[in-house]
């Protein structure tokens, strides 16, 4: 039934049950509902002739029908109450420009009991068998077969699980193949080694590389084997298809798309999608010949707690929707993005769990005053939350937000440049979040005038180098972002790759980024805490550094190895500068030093300020080779320990009459950094 027909049918079923004088009109959705009913009753009644609806789409159509029946009904509050249960989608739940509420009365979709409603993009509780197809003996080792369970994907409703494709740095991000999740956690596609990496070795060429060590007998090119590796730099990885493996010469030959950076010896990689490497619990493999998924389950395995991802379109897709709140639901198991909101206004997801997605958890594009609040986002293949909102040409802020969320275990497919929060545009807010457990960044920001505050960021950049927990770079016009009152801790380098720069930064203003303010943050055991990589108009003030190495560095790369970026109008920095009409309002008025930058040595660092910071038990400042005027350094203090500074090492409170108090250093509110509990009213 198409949507227009559904609305007509709903009008007929509603009859006179709609009271347009009511201030709140409730529509109920339940597992035992029927889409032929009105949805105005919470339980089936009238001898089975009326009751709740069965789907969200039917609830949407019921609301539209009520509004069509009586134009005055639009002024009322609509609430869709979703009863506990698991609701499987086979296509996106789509909402358009007419499917929201008003500024005074936003339309609400909410779980009647928060956390009890699961909206899923794949089958759950599928049938598993210990009776393996005969083909299994040729795929798996004798060690594995006694432990394996098999699931016929066609019988589970999945006719095409999808294939692995070239992806990663410099490549597209296609939807991922069907995945298996158990108790909300992503299970592991069979790989060798099961954890960690192998090392590339000579010889290397455009489409081949050597490898160190021997492979177990099960790792062969008898199936669709791929390799995933950091082939050159420790901030760029790709998946490449294996054409053949010469086990005598220890050489892997790849086919298909050439990787972004050429293969190099002594680099990290692993084999993936290898049935012979399925050698332990929590691992699976999909045999596409028989369309069978094999799984080595963990101890105490409960089939009812498994889910397979199937949908490739977002679970929820909004375009032009305004004034809508979606609350209290678990959204899971999509091979692509979980939720997509385009051109929305005042669209908020609150108290939701967004998990088990193949690509991004939730994206907001060209929206205003929209975002996520008090949500949990985890087990995500790419970025946790994407906010691409605000007009860079006019510098009009979007005021979209990521607030009070726990975001962790993301970038599980594409490891680099898929952060917990990805910002682009103008005037967005990331505040009071816990962000952790990622191979690369916590927050990647592009654009202007964002606010990043009161976040607790730790244990990121865990397997990358030349990386930043909070990062932006290579654009002279991306200015105005403020990074304040954040707690950065336990962000440390883990690599020693020959020939690579492998340090990690808590805040990384890369490649001549300008106009960023970093103030009143706590950096504790936070590696190379702040790098100002050749830019200008950056301010670093009032920060507390404890056991960092170093606290701050400033360089002049635009005068050295990066000078070609400024060498001609075709250089990348000048192209990006000209694209934003930097010497005209609003840029010329918002950022005074920008208007005449071409007459002011644009490649040189200038007008940077480092003031009022405290350094404890740390290496202080690296600022070698800077031209005069690159940075003003004033009123900073260094101490051997927190007691000498007069700062409490746990609460970071400043003691009266201490050296820190004398210099005017404030007590930084660490207890307010990160997720906060809702106030009781």
Image: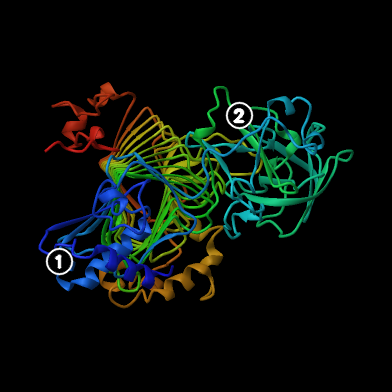
Asked whether residue 203 is in view, the answer is yes
Is any atom of residue 424 visible in this view?
no
Q: Residue 119 or 230: which is nearer the viewer?
A: 119
Counting from the top left corner in percent of width and height, residue 428 is at 30, 58
Q: Which residue is mark 1?
A: 75
**Pick the front one: 450 or 46:** 46
Q: Position of residue 298 (x, y in %)?
A: 58, 26
Quarter holding the C terminus is: top left
Going by the image, does 478 lie left or right of 177? left
How far separated are the C-alphas under marks 2 and 1? 53 Å
Q: Which mark lies nearer to you, 2 or 1?
A: 1
Label 1 element class: helix
Quarter containing the N terminus: bottom left
Q: Residue furthest right?
A: 248
**What residue do we see at 46% from left, 53% from top?**
89
Q: Residue furthest front?
A: 47
Left or right side of 454 for 125: right
Residue at 33% across, 68% down: 9
Residue 65, relative to residue 37: is it above or below? below
Badge 2 element: loop
Q: Residue 302: give its label.
A: none
- Compare residues 609 and 234 and report the one nearer the observer: 234
Q: Are marks 2 and 1 in contact (CB under 8 Å)?
A: no
Residue 477: x %, y % from top left: 38, 66
Number of marks: 2
- Residue 285: x %, y % from top left: 68, 40
Q: Is residue 206 above or below residue 497?
A: below
Q: Pointer 2: what residue?
A: 297
Q: Rate crowding at label 2 as few (under 14), some (14 to 19) or many (20 or more) other CA atoms within 10 Å.
A: some
């Amino acid at each position: 039934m198409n949507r227009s027909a559904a609305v007509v049918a709903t009008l007929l079923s509603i009859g006179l049950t709609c009271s347009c004088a009511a201030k709140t009109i409730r529509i109920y959705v339940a597992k035992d509902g029927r889409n032929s009913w009105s949805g105005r009753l919470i339980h089936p009644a009238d001898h089975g002739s009326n009751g709740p609806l069965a789907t969200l789409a039917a609830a949407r159509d019921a609301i539209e029908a009520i509004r069509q029946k009586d134009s005055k009904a639009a002024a009322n509050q609509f609430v869709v109450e979703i009863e506990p249960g698991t609701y499987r989608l086979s296509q996106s739940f789509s909402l358009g420009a007419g499917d929201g509420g008003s500024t005074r009365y936003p339309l609400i979709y909410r779980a009647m009991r928060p956390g009890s409603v699961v909206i899923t993009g794949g089958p759950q509780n599928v049938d598993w068998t210990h009776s393996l197809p005969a083909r299994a003996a040729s795929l798996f080792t004798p060690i594995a077969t006694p432990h394996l369970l098999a699931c016929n994907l066609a019988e589970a409703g999945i006719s095409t699980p999808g294939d692995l494709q070239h992806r990663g740095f410099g490549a597209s991000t296609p939807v991922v193949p069907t995945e298996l999740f158990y108790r909300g956690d992503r299970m592991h596609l069979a790989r060798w080694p099961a954890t960690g990496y192998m090392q590339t070795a000579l010889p290397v060429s455009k489409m081949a590389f050597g490898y160190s060590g021997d492979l177990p007998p099960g790792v062969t090119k008898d199936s669709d084997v791929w390799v995933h590796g950091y082939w050159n730099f420790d901030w760029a990885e790709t998946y490449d298809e294996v054409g053949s493996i010469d086990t005598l010469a220890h050489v892997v030959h790849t086919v298909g798309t050439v990787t972004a950076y050429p293969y190099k010896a002594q680099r990290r990689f692993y084999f993936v999608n290898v049935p012979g490497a399925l050698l332990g619990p929590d691992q699976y493999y999909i045999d596409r010949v028989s369309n069978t998924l094999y799984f080595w389950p963990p101890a105490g395995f409960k089939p009812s707690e498994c889910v397979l991802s199937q949908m490739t379109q977002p679970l929820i897709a909004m375009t032009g929707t305004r004034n809508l709140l979606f609350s209290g639901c678990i959204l899971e198991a999509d091979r692509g993005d979980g939720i997509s909101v385009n051109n929305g206004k005042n669209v908020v997801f609150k108290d939701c769990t967004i998990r088990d997605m193949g690509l991004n958890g939730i994206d907001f594009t060209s929206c205003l005053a929209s975002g996520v609040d008090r949500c949990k986002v985890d087990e995500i293949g790419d970025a946790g939350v994407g906010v691409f909102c605000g007009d860079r040409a006019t510098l009009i802020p979007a005021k979209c937000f990521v607030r009070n969320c726990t975001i962790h275990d993301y970038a599980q497919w594409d490891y680099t440049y898929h952060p917990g929060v990805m910002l682009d545009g103008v005037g967005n807010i990331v505040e009071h979040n816990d962000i952790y457990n990622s191979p690369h960044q916590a927050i990647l920001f592009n654009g202007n005038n964002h606010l990043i505050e009161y976040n607790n960021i730790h244990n990121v950049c865990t397997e990358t180098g030349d990386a930043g927990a909070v990062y932006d770079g290579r654009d002279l016009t991306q200015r105005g972002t403020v990074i304040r009152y954040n707690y950065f801790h336990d962000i440390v380098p883990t690599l020693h790759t020959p020939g690579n720069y492998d340090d990690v930064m808590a805040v990384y203003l890369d490649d001549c980024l300008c106009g960023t303010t970093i103030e009143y943050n706590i950096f504790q055991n936070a590696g190379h805490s702040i790098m100002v990589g050749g830019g200008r108009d950056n301010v670093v003030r009032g920060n507390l550094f404890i056991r960092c190495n170093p606290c701050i560095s400033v360089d002049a790369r635009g005068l050295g190895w990066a000078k070609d970026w400024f060498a001609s109008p075709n250089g990348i920095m000048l192209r990006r500068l000209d694209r934003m009409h930097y010497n005209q309002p609003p840029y010329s008025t918002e950022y005074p030093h920008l208007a005449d930058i071409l007459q002011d040595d644009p490649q040189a660092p200038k007008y940077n300020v480092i003031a009022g910071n405290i350094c404890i038990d740390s290496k202080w400042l690296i600022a070698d080779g800077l031209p005069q005027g690159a940075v003003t350094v004033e009123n900073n203090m260094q101490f051997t320990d927190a007691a000498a500074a007069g700062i409490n090492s746990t609460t970071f409170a400043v003691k009266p009459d201490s050296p820190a108090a004398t210099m005017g250093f404030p007590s930084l509110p660490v207890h307010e950094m990160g997720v906060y509990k809702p106030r009781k009213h």
